[in-house]
Structures are given as structure tokens and as C-alpha cells.
Image (cartoon, helix red, strand yellow):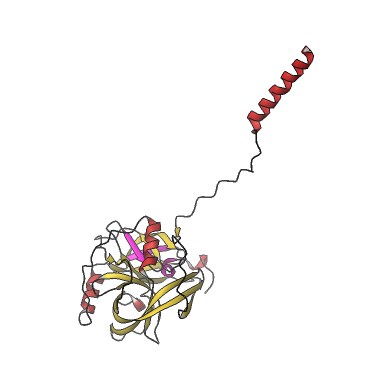
Amino acid sequence: MRRWDYFAAILLISLVLNSLFTGGERRAPVAEAPRRPPPTVIAHPPAPQAPSPGLPLSRVEHKMKSRSTAGTAFAVDDVGTWLTARHVVDGCDRVGIIYDHKTKRAERMTLRAVHSNADVAVLSGRVPGNPRPVALAAALDGETEAFHVGYPKGRRAVLHSAYLGRWRLVGFGRFRNDEEVAVWGVISRFPEDLPGFAGISGGPVFSADGRVIGISVAGSDRRGRVIASLPRSFHQALDAAGGTPPQRPGDLRFTGADYRAVGERLLDGLRVARVFCKVTTTSKTGG
């Protein structure tokens, strides 16, 4: 009897030790720790926001970059946060804000966030002079006219436009986006001989009271149209980058008579600036 007690004790001790070292229950295989995400954050909308049904459809291809390009960006807070179009800064080896056009000096920027479903990006970096931020609208709310500021064709330019309606913009290629956008028809422009709109991408679209109601993301030179993202898209990207700046009223007033002067003050003060995308040709493929 004692012998059986001895063997039972040995068996019990073995079971306890086995439980301590291997666990008393079955476990799923331990997954490897995920790799650290890249510095750029993908901003996911809080809920799926499909474009409204029945909208006119426009498609745009985001091609691989084989050379350096430029676009427009604008300051949105006092700590070095800028907004631009994603296609302007996506695929670049370096990004910078040009703050001295005579010497072509630029301040290097960091790509902080891109929107997962809209052509919007957030940059971070200080520019000499610390340009004053512009005011951001919460939504596009019944505006019938707008004013676009930026560097189309590499030239300082300001456009006055009329609201045409909402479209669905689908981008494909280097990255994909499927978003509801606003379409604006250009009424007048400065300079008057401006041949096209390429390069104004990433620039702010202002309401008459000086609040940003969109970001220029595409256009049609032949039809005289500019397509712009909606405020909800750039607010979502800013939230992913660390938070939207506090709401404040616009400190500008645009009219059809003086929009050129107002736009030039924004450009002079670097509140709207030219953003440079440096591409090392040997590291890129595609056209």
C-alpha cells in the first residue's frame, strides 16, 4: 500500500511540474511581434464614408514618380503642421517647403500622415518666420464661390471660381483613393495668361470669409475646372497626425475684385507655400 502511495505522489508531483512549465491548458501559437510601422501613419476614417450614390465619376492615375516635382502646401497651426495633397508628396525621397524663391532654399519636411481613402497628406516642419496658420472650415456649407491659392506651373497664382457640384473621384496606380469631392469652375485667374493648373495641387481652397473649405487635388485645364477634397477628409488626416487645430474665424476676406491682392499676401507671408518633392531617379521606376 505504501508503495502505491509512493508512486501516486511521484505522479502527482510530475503533473504539477508539467503544468507549471507548459501551462495547464492548450494555447494558440504565440504570434510574432508586429514590425514597427513606418513613420508615415495611414489615417483611417472613423467610419466608412462612401461617396453619395449617383455622382458623376472622374478617374485619375497616380503614376510612379521618376523625377522631382513641386506642388503647394499651407500652414494650419503654430507648431509646424502643413496640409497638402497626397499625390504631391507620396513617393518622394525628400520633401521640403521652399521659403526663399531667389536662392531656392527649402526647409525639409516630415510626412506625418496620409489619408487612407482621400488625396490628403499632413507634413511637419518649421519654416523660417513661422508663418501664421490659416483657418479651417468644419464643412463645405453652401458656399457658391471659392478662391484657390498656389503655384500652378510653378507660378504664383490665385483663382476665383464658382461651385459646380459634387463628384466622385477615384484614384488608382501608386495609391488608391475613392472620395467625394467638390468641383469648381474657374471664373477668373491671376495671372491672366496662366496656361494650366498643374502645381496648384495641395493648395488651399478658401471661402469668401477666409476659411479653408478644400484642398485642390486635380483639375481640367481645357474645361477650366479644379477638383478639391472636402473638409472632412483633411480633418480626418489631421486627427490621425495628432489632432485638428482649434477652430477660429478666418482673418481674410476675398472678393471678386481683390482676390489677387489677398492671395498674394498669403504667398508673401508663406502661409501658402511651394512644396518641393525630391526624387532620386536611380531609385525610382515607372513613368
Residue drawn at x 79%, y 13% as measured from the top left: 1
Residue drawn at x 49%, y 53% as measured from the top left: 37
Residue 191: name its quadrant: bottom left
Apparent side of residue 19 relative to residue 163 in the rendered image (left or right): right
> In the image, residue 62 lies at what x, y percent?
49, 73
Which residue is outermost to the top? 2
> In the image, residue 252 lies at what x, y percent?
21, 71
Q: Residue 91 colored magenta?
A: yes
Q: Looking at this view, is 82 or 186 the one in front?
A: 186
From which residue to which does the magenta span run? 79-97
- Vertical relation: 58 (above or below) 123: below
> In the image, residue 269 lies at what x, y percent?
23, 67
Q: Residue 87 colored magenta?
A: yes
Residue 77: name its quadrant: bottom left
Q: Looking at this view, is 58 or 107 the one in front?
A: 58
Is residue 156 among what the camera can see?
A: no
Q: How many marks?
A: 0
Is residue 170 among what the camera can see?
A: yes
Residue drawn at x 50%, y 50% as measured from the top left: 36
Apparent side of residue 13 relative to residue 149 in the rendered image (left or right): right
> In the image, residue 114 lies at what x, y percent?
43, 62
Residue 264: name its quadrant: bottom left
Residue drawn at x 42%, y 62% as measured from the top left: 94
